[in-house]
Amino acid sequence: MVCGPIFPLCCTILLLDVPPFFVEIAHKIFWLTVVGALAGNYFGVIRLSWVSDNFEGLALFSILFSVLLAIYIYVSSFITKELLSDLGNSGKISSLYACDAFSGS
């Protein structure tokens, strides 16, 4: 199970039983991101200094966008009467209900 943007590592790796396949994919995505950022900076596509200077704003926008998108999808599922999952949970007993909400299970 892969949790959403708010709790990506705490839910998937530390608290839940995660198949090695998901950890392997996360590892590949990490290295792809590092190589892509360095290549983009080298070729002038992105400036890592700008990203560093504006990190707080970028992080805040990312969090707000993710939460608003999750709320929109949740509300729209009731409007269209579309069942996204049985009972609205993953079946795991956890105190982090937000993980189920943001993963869509």
Image (cartoon, rainbow, N blue to C red):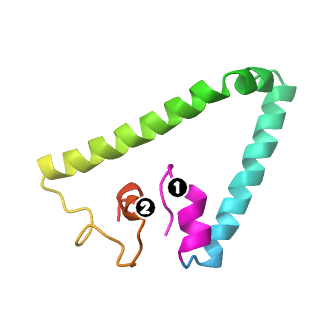
Residue type for callout 1: Phe
SS type, badge 1: loop
Residue 39 left/right relative to 24: right
Q: Which of 44/19 is in front?
A: 19
Name the residue at the front extreme.
95
| Residue 77 placement (x, y as % from top left) | 20, 51
In the rendered structure, are the residues bearing label 2 and label 1 in contact, judged by CB atoms less than 8 Å apart?
Answer: yes
Residue 74 located left or right of residue 49: left
* Percent x, y of residue 50: 74, 20
Per the rendering, the mark at residue 105 is none
**Amino acid marked by disc 2:** Cys
Q: Which mark is residue 99?
A: 2
Q: Which residues are magenta?
A: 1-16
Instruction: Say which label, 2 or 1, has the lower sequence index.
Output: 1
| Front residue of 23 and 97 | 97
The percent coordinates of residue 46 (x first, y second) are 74, 24
Quadrant where the image shows the C terminus: bottom left
11 falls in the magenta region:
yes
* Viewer-closest of 33 and 62: 62
Q: Which residue is mark 1?
A: 7
Q: Residue at 49% x, 70% y: name it.
A: 1
